[in-house]
Amino acid sequence: MNRSLPCILIGALAGLTGVLSGCASLGDEGGSRLDLVKQRGELLCGVSGKIPGFSFLSPDGRYEGLDVDICRAMAAAFVGDSEKVQYRPLTAPERFTALRSGEIDLLSRNTTHTLSRDAVGGNGLSFAPVVFHDGQGLMVPADSGVNSLADLSGKAICVGSGTTTEQNLNDAFQSRDLPYKPIKYQDLNQVVGGYLQGRCAAMTSDRSQLAAARSGFADPQKHVILGDRISKEPLAPAVVGGDQRMSDAMSWVIYALIEAEERGITKANLTEMVEKAKADPSQAALRRFLGVDGGLGSKLDLPDDFVVQVIQATGNYGEIYARHLGPGSAVEIPRGANRLAENGGLMIAPPFT
Amino acid sequence: MQRRRLLLQIGFAAVLLSLLALLINNLAVNLIRTGLGVSFSWLQRPAGFALAEHVLPYSPSDSYAWALAVGWFNSLKVILAGLVLSTLLGVGAGAARSSGNRLLRNLAGAYVALIRQVPLLLQLLFWYFVAFLGLPNTPAAGLIHFSNQGIRLLGLPLSVEFCSVLTGLTVFTGASIAEIVRGGINSVPRGQWEAYRSLGLADGLGLRRIVLPQALPAILPALTSQYLNLAKNSTLAIAVGYADLYAVSDTTITQTGRAIEGFLLLLLSFLLLNLLISGGMAAFNGAVLGRLRSSR
């Protein structure tokens, strides 16, 4: 008995040592994450899982939303099957560590593109083009008499921690010389709880998230989102920096979604468009876009027809938006800045040449 | 036999050392891989976020280092108050469980049974969202006032977040302390009770002067670990919006992207805090044992 205890201890420690030695991974030096995804045949995608319209569990237990469709589009392009995605629900503070540590391949979790997150001296990420132009706002009870930021001077404001939201809130109030009291929670659900219980005069988050949260309230019409937009929040997917093949592939999948909308290619008319491109050699641009010729896909290390795979899986950007955020959806957000550039919005794709 | 033992000990030390070396190596390798060096220069930069409550003066233009210090003192405030209150509650409930009064004994038993079965995080959320935020929403006035905008006790203003964390930690830790105290009291021979009763002492006085002092050596070591638990559990404060050290670190890490340095500082801060607590308790324990020995 006395003799066996140290042996067990040493054995346990040795086992732990073996496990831990696997944690230092210098292995894939120079290799791209894209190869790993293809080899695995599955994409590990980080999402929020808690924001209706962006990523939320549907009644049948599957993730749904704009962010989720971005994951599916990536999987369709990378491994040829939009169902080959493993979703990892992440909190705001967890998301960059998850990306960095390789727990996920790609982050599609309403993440704001900022200098600090992009730069090597900061989080060192590579961002895709913006998939949703958002802005931070404040929501107050409709009968509170609060109409602008100035009315909130000295009041308590509920805010989620670990996001740019907190910093924007401070910038907005400090620059206007208004005192305020941030009541900081870790989770959006708790922010909503604190606000609905009357702890705070207002809650703040991206306006899309405010609209999503309000859709779940018992009396949505008793709450108003103030006109003040205190930040610009271009939300974009991201991968670890310094991996050009991965970040290029990601970016051009997003561009493909936008270009498809510009060209009027939808899930419904896709087959027809592909046949038209194949039959008509004079449609040079369309043939390149759909991978009939030009070999654009292989320049990205993707199949030449990756655009077809993507549109087949999710439809174009406009279709994705309409499905999750358009009129008639649970979280209706006017398309505004997210319209195509030709319609007065900000969405535009560089040429597929 | 002797040699075999020595060999085992050397083997054990070698495995332990290589484990440590491996951990440091993992950190170094992963730091190189991600291109991040360890740097603490960001501590001097302005934090740029406000804190809802602070013991020390603080404004968003103060440095990250100062923000973390303010968070540390917020933690300290709730931990110290929690230590005192949970000890009072725990000793009271523990003594009640050995009491002759059946109602008191059963009440204390129910309290311990209920609180020990429910996770602390759930209890904190209950105290905050149900108990304290359920108070009426009225502006604070008077010496004693309860509202979901803040509590006033004898003119002392307390935030509902602070009160929730304090109540949660006190009630949760109090239940464990009650069990430790009960165990300590049970370890005192029944003869001691009979002895003070035969001297005509009342139960309350006998408990305080005869039984508890003899139970202390059995209570103190276990009590120390409950105190340390309370200090560590205080990091759950972020769930209910209290600006403790962990909440401030969390914001700091997101804004600076310096996760490894942030967590190292967090580790060191808690190490310091817990060394203070266990050091204080060790000194107290020594004094109690010394007194006991000299009185025999």
Image: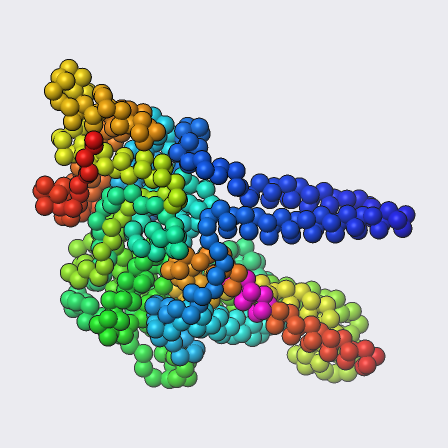
A315 or A1, nearer to the observer = A315
Say which quarter of the image contains residue A266. top left
> Which residue is at 89% across, 50% downward?
B2
Q: Position of residue B188 (x, y in %)?
A: 76, 70
In the figure, is residue B85 to the left or right of A323? right
In this orientation, which residue lies closer to the viewer: A196 or A211? Answer: A211
Asked if B58 appears above or below A198 in the picture, the reply is below
Q: Residue furthest left?
A: A343
Q: Position of residue B279 (x, y in %)?
A: 66, 72
Q: Is residue A152 left or right of residue B178?
A: left
Residue at position x 29%, y 51% in the image: A113
Q: Is residue B267 magenta?
A: yes
Is residue A228 magenta-colored? no
Residue A300 location, quadrant: top left
- Residue placed at 32% from the left, 58% from the top? A164
Whether residue A216 is visible to the viewer of this picture, yes or no, is no
User: Which part of the image, by quadrant, shows the C terminus of chain B?
Assistant: bottom right
Q: Where B117 sits versus B103, above or below?
A: above
Which region is colored magenta?
B266-274
Return the residue nearer the eye: A245 or A267: A245
Name the residue at 81% across, 81% down: B295
Whole-percent x and y of residue B187?
Answer: 75, 66
Using the image as rendered, state which of residue A204 and residue A119 is in the foreground.
A119
Dominant SS type (magenta): helix
Can you say whether B141 is above or below A248 in the image? below
